[in-house]
């Protein structure tokens, strides 16, 4: 039964993403915040259906730690879930993502209107510079930046080396880094079809200031904060 429910949910997610992407494309003339409101509406409906069909919901601890203004979020990346959840957790935002996502019909059209920082991960230093330059521009416009420093989804419980672009952007802009930990991969695995019932826990850590730190030091501090959050989630 859970497999069937997961199939129904996945079908809805794919169809609705295309429909909402088309709606956003038709409203290309709308300001960014109106486009973001449409995307947030899609995320809210999607998670409502996820809870009703698959019994999967989520809680967020530490919302009071979100600093005023706009800053940079760094999160572990184990599922597709957290990419959608950001719409509901943080204020208007842009993501650092691989440019190939913009080539998806309908979905990519909507994504493009959300002003992402779309990079070619194979370009190395050029991609890092792109994150820094475009990231500073988005921050000046009052938007948050969402970065998954591991660069790709990993199996729950595993970690990858953090890329430097997020830390370098924080240092260049002077913006805080807000660490985010979650266990979504336990319920909605990377490349997994089955959505397991339960409650995903999200923990927002204390903001980390970049002043006086180099990218390696800042990344290490962020990583330790994310891992501390994951340890709290894993503890009984």
Image: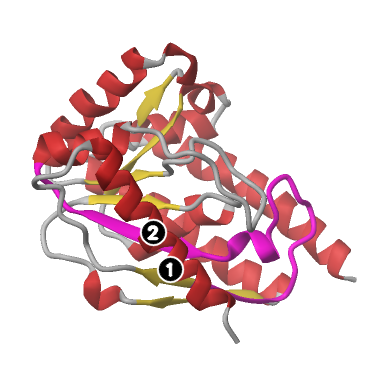
Position of 28 with respect to 176 (left or right) is right
Image quadrant containing the C terminus: bottom right
Gap in angstroms between the C-alphas marked 2 and 1: 6 Å
Residue at the image position 39 percent from the left and 25 percent from the top: 118
Rendered location of residue 105, percent (x, y): 57, 26
Residue 77 lies, in percent from the top left, at: 53, 49
Q: Secondary structure at mark 1?
A: helix
Is 231 placed left or right of 66 in the picture?
A: right
Q: Which residues are magenta?
A: 174-201
Residue at (53, 76) in percent of width and height: 233
Q: Is residue 220 left or right of 9 when viewed as pictured?
A: left
Evaluate if marks 2 and 1 touch, with contact meaning CB atoms under 8 Å apart: yes
Query: Is the N terminus in the top left, top right, bottom left or bottom right quadrant?
Result: bottom right
Crowd band around label 2 with a 10 angstrom C-alpha radius: few (<14), some (14–19), many (20+): few
Report the front residue among 45 and 139: 139
Q: Nearer the viewer, residue 219 or 85?
A: 219
Q: Callout 2: helix, strand or loop?
A: helix
Q: Is residue 181 above or below residue 121?
A: below
The residue labelled by disc 2 is 224
Is 137 part of what is drawn in magenta?
no
For this rendering, which residue is in front, 109 or 203?
Answer: 203
Above-or-below relation of 23 to 60: above
In the picture of the structure, the residue carrying the numbered disc 1 is: 228
């Amino acid at each position: 039964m859970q497999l069937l429910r997961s199939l129904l949910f996945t079908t809805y997610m794919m169809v609705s993403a295309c429909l909402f992407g088309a709606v956003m494309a038709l409203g290309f003339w709308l300001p960014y915040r109106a486009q973001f409101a449409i995307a947030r509406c899609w995320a809210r409906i999607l998670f409502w259906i996820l809870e009703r069909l698959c019994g999967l919901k989520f809680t967020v601890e530490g919302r009071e730690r979100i600093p005023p203004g706009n800053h940079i979020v760094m999160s572990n990346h184990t599922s597709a879930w957290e990419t959608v959840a950001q719409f509901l957790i943080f204020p208007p935002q842009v993501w650092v993502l691989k440019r190939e996502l913009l080539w998806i019909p309908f979905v990519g059209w909507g994504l493009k209107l959300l002003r992402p920082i779309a990079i070619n991960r194979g370009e190395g230093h050029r991609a890092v510079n792109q994150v820094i330059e475009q990231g500073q521009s988005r921050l000046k416009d009052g938007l948050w930046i969402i970065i998954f420093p591991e660069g790709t989804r990993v199996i729950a419980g595993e970690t990858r080396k953090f890329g430097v672009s997020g830390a370098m952007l924080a240092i260049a802009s002077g913006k805080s880094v807000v660490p985010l930990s979650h266990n979504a991969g336990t319920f909605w695995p990377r490349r997994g079809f089955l959505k397991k019932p339960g409650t995903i826990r999200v923990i927002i850590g204390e903001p980390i200031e970049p002043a006086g730190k180099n990218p390696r030091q800042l990344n290490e501090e962020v990583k330790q904060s994310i891992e501390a959050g994951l340890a709290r989630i894993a503890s009984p």
